Structures are given as structure tokens and as C-alpha cells.
Image: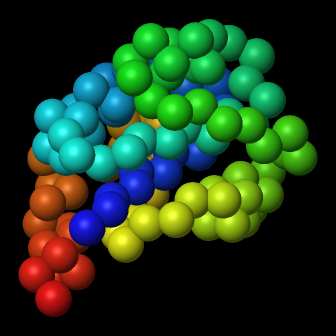
Amino acid sequence: MKTAILIPCYNEELSIEKVIKDLKKELPEADIYVYDNNSKDKTVEIAKEAGAIVRHEYNQGKGNVVRRMFREIEADVYVMVDGDDTYPAEEVNKLIAPIVER
């Protein structure tokens, strides 16, 4: 079962590394995609160094990013989180369990 973690980002250099590393720990088999939305900081560089697949959406706005992510990425399970460490990664397995167990 292919799992994709989708992270829309705009200027998240302070937290993106932690988000990626925490999710890799919880779902090591998942592909982690960071979609940058014209960040002016080092979000892209940090995300690449942390091991994420980085893509870009140049039309500003989270709605544009979300549409592009779901248009481009094929997976059985999708997990979308924010790049600012809003959601605790240790909860992700509980979140996707009903889907994975089907």
C-alpha cells in the first residue's frame, strides 16, 4: 500500500525539518512531498536536506497547492499536514489505521 504525505509550505524553515523527520520515523515507507508555494526563506533547501521530495506551486494560495498535490500524486493513502508542526506525527498511524486495515 503506497502512502504519500503531502505538506503544503510557505516560509516554514523553522519547522519543516522536524515535521519531515518526525513523519519519517512514524511512516518510514511513505513518500514525503513538500509543495513549496513561493517561500522566501530556506524551506526548499531544508526540506530537500531532510529527505523530502520537493515540488513547487507558483500560483499563490493553499487552495492552488492542494489542487496540484492531489492532481500530481498517486497513492493509496494520503496524509496532508501543515509544515509548521501543527499536527503531532505520533498520531499519524492512528489516523490512517481505518484505511490501512480495510
Q: Residue furthest bottom?
A: 102
Residue at coordinates 40% horizontally, 23% vertically from top-left?
51
Rendered residue at 32%/62% (across/down): 2
Q: Position of residue 21 (x, y in %)?
A: 27, 26
Q: State left or right for residue 56 relative to residue 60.
A: left
Toward the viewer: 22 or 48? 48
**75 versus 88 height, above or below:** below
**Image location (x, y in percent) of residue 53:** 52, 33
Taking 80 as reference, is 7 above or below it?
Answer: above
Residue 97 percent across, percent down from the top left: 13, 73
User: Does the rendering let one see residue 75?
Assistant: yes
Q: Is residue 100 left or right of residue 58?
A: left
- Give the quarter of the image for residue 75: bottom left
Residue at coordinates 68% horizontally, 12% vertically from top-left?
A: 41
- In the rendered image, residue 62, in percent from the top left (x then y), is placed at 71, 53
Drawn side of residue 101 relative to residue 23, left or right: left
Q: In which quarter of the view is residue 24 placed?
A: top left
In this orientation, which residue lies closer to the viewer: 70 or 82? 70
> How many labels sit on residues?
0
| Residue under the image location 86 percent in, 39 percent down | 58
In which quadrant of the rendered image does the N terminus lie?
bottom left
11 relative position to 68: left or right: left
Q: Can residue 13 be seen?
A: no
Against 52, residue 82 (above or below) is below
Quadrant showing the C terminus: bottom left
- Here the colouring is rainbow
